[in-house]
Image (spheres, helix red, strand yellow):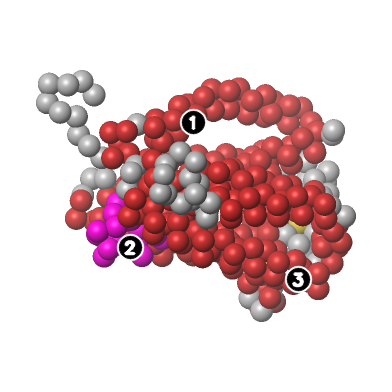
Amino acid sequence: MTDALIAITVLWGFVFIYAVMATMDFGAGFWSMIYINREKTKATNIANRYLSPTWEVTNTFIVALVVAVYSLFPTAAYTLGTVLLVPGSMILLLLALRSAFLVFSNIATEYRKPLTYISGITGILIPGLLISVLPITHGEFVDYETGFAQLNLGELFTSPNVYAFIGFGISSTLFLSSVLLADYSKVSHAMDAYQVYLRDARIFGPISLAMAFLIMLTLRGEAPWLYDKMMEDLPLLLFSLVFFLIGGAGLFLPSFFEKGVRGMPRLAMIAVTIQYLVASYVYGKAHLPYIVYPGVTIESAFTDPNSFRAVFVTYIVGFAILFPGFIYFWSLFMHDKRYLRQRKPKEGTQS
């Protein structure tokens, strides 16, 4: 495996981790807005309880992703920075707006309701804009007539494939977040909220699958080079579909551990994450060796090998330090009964 291939694997790993975590984060904000007036279900409380400690962890990975692009593929960073000027600026603006409200909401409780609406609106807009980066890298909307890469916005916003990606990004955000919040509601013993999110997951699961098929249909006409290479790994795509069906079954089958409760959201969450991982591997493999088709490849954009080795060692050391912390945080977050049920310790007892 060449240094450039190792580097793009690291970069794609950051993309996948951030994509999964961010969809859950953004989706939680959307569901919080949708159910803000349905206090009996406690669905908004569950979403906000998940949202509060996780958004900062999620932002860690987008910082790591941006730093990885600039340090590992500086030439690609220049091209991407040029063609993504408009969508990138919109993403940064929405992220800054959302982060500001999340920070101040912990200080001034009167901003709780504006926070809910800001999180909900951005929870739909940001994933759609983020995933639109992928069809831009396919090259059909990038012009080199002036000698510099320029994004053709007219062609971009009239492309069925772009809207298929946006639809997939939004539906996946709502699907993954509803599955996670169903699981979170279940361990919190908030069964009214659990039923609400389980129903949402059952609705948006098939929609996400339909959007995935629509991506492939439109990709065949707009980026045949990518479609043909993905079809070479058709067995892996079918393998990923099997895991999606397992995840779907987990939303309907009766629980093995609780009588009278239907649905195993933990199984669904694991199976669907594996499905997204396999499908993203097929897409990423087919995309190689191009970062932006056809002008920017991983070899042409790669940094100096000595610089890469130094950066790679830094990443290994950094994640060796941070990863156990993330695991510990997640275990506390999902297993601390007092936090899950929002109960305060009794006086005279230790927390």
Q: Can you tell which quarter of the image residue 312 is in?
A: top right
**Where does label 1 land, which residue?**
326
Q: Per the image, is 30 magenta?
A: yes
Q: Residue furthest front?
A: 259
From what the image shows, is residue 158 above or below residue 58?
A: below
Q: Secondary structure at mark 3?
A: helix
**Where does label 3 land, which residue?**
217
**Where are the magenta residues, as a range?**
29-46
Q: What's the distance in space between the residues labelled 3 and 2, CA to CA?
A: 35 Å
Majority secondary structure in the magenta region: helix
Disc 1 packing (10 Å; few <14; some 14–19; many ≥20) = few
Amino acid at circle 1: Phe
Amino acid at circle 3: Leu
Q: Is residue 73 left or right of residue 325?
A: right
Q: What's the distance in space between the residues labelled 2 and 1, CA to CA?
A: 29 Å
Amino acid at circle 2: Tyr
Q: Secondary structure at mark 1?
A: helix
